[in-house]
Amino acid sequence: MKLTDCHNIDDFRRLAKQRLPWPVFDYIDGAADDEITKARNTSAFDEVDLVPNVLAGVGTIDTSCSIMGRKSALPLMLSPTALQRAFHRDGERAVAKAAEKFGVWFGISSLATHSIEEIAELTSGPKLFQLYVHKDKGLNASMIERCQAAKFDAIALTVDTIVSGKRERCLRSGFTTPPRFTASALWSYATRPRWTLDYVFGPKFRLPNLDAHVQEGSGKAVSIQDYFNTMLDVDMDWDTAARIRQDWGGKFALKGVMSVADARRAVEIGADAIMISNHGGRQLDGSRAPFDQLREIVDEVGGEIEIILDGGVRRGTHVLKSLAAGATAASGGRLYLYALAAAGQPGVERAVNILKEEIERAMRLMGVTSVDQLTPDRLRWR
């Protein structure tokens, strides 16, 4: 299978599975416990149908929207995800360049493998930094100050990972950061020589946003579960979120909001946006899908705060359904991570272009010429 054989996100998943050692693939692909929520994140979109209009004169359409004060060419964001150099040698650099080419938002994680400063120098496109609140308050302050100096457009505080979900695929494979060659996976590493040679002979794997503060994840191999369970602040609360918003002073989002009550509190602390998200099903298995929760959150806070539907997006029609249900935009991680793992920057560009074409085609077939015409009356719930 080649990159040119990829015509949808699931094709990129298959190619990534071919090219990655299985512990690394399972880190991307896996989720918590029985992975029920991960599957539901995508299948939830099947519960609603689009209602098209015809004869609408759709020769010219506008797919752009405004997200947190910056124009985006598509109503689609590339969510921040950790450890990207574990999937391809170019990591976040490839995603940043692809996002800039298509004029869309992207984010980098606290656990990114390229630094805040390097990514800022690389692109002038809209970018956010995803903040994990660590027990080390000096580290939290350092990351915020570095984002201010680098002129990041927004910070997204992740609020759903005070402890790690039970990611059983990672427990079976022994996946760590940095990745290590376990006995059970040696054959898989040996039969993926391109990945293995890039990893062994490439620049040292590190997490440069943490380097000066913690050893875990850079010099010392540790599982993501152990990292979350030992390094992150389990006492984080609404006062913490309000303080971080104040310290940052710029556009501020909460990532991981799932309830109406929490959406209301996000408005009360002055957040600019919420990302309705269950962390790709990697935290609380059995929780609701973001799309399942979207309508009631929109009913409560729509028009008071931007609402970004994060998770499960695999098709352009998923984006349109999110917008018609009241979201400002849609967002996802695996939708580009599979492509990054499959082919680096060309893979990410092909994946985003496929979604762009699907959004454009679906808008024309829906009879809409701008995204603000995607309103609730264009949906029917089964």
Image (cartoon, rainbow, N blue to C red):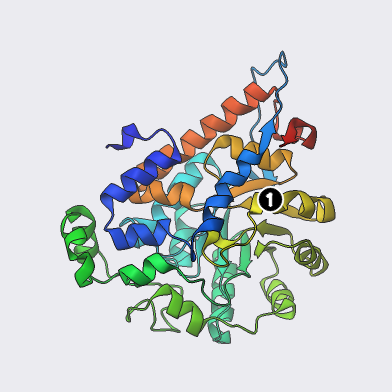
Q: Residue 79: image x %, image y %?
A: 54, 55
Q: Quadrant of residue 183?
A: bottom left
Q: Residue at x 65, y 36 (%)?
A: 320
Q: Secondary structure at mark 1?
A: helix
The one of 126 and 362 positioned closer to us in this rendering:
362
Indicate the amino acid at tag 1.
Answer: Asp
The one of 199 and 52 positioned closer to us in this rendering:
52
The reply, left or right, for residue 1 in relation to residue 111 is: left
Mark 1 crowd level (few <14, some 14–19, many ≥20, 10 Å Cα) = some
Q: Residue 93: image x %, image y %?
A: 40, 55
Q: Residue at x 32, y 72 (%)?
A: 174
Q: Is residue 145 above or below residue 16?
A: below
The one of 141 and 337 positioned closer to us in this rendering:
337
Q: Residue 311: image x %, image y %?
A: 57, 52
* Quadrant the N terminus occupies: top left
Mark 1 sits on what residue? Answer: 292
Q: Is residue 11 above or below residue 255?
A: above
| Number of numbered discs on residues | 1
Q: Residue at x 34, y 69 (%)?
A: 172
Q: Residue at x 43, y 84 (%)?
A: 214
The reply, left or right, for residue 144 in relation to residue 322 is: left
Q: Residue 73: image x %, image y %?
A: 60, 39
Q: Is residue 314 above or below residue 83?
A: above
Residue 87 seen in this snapshot: yes
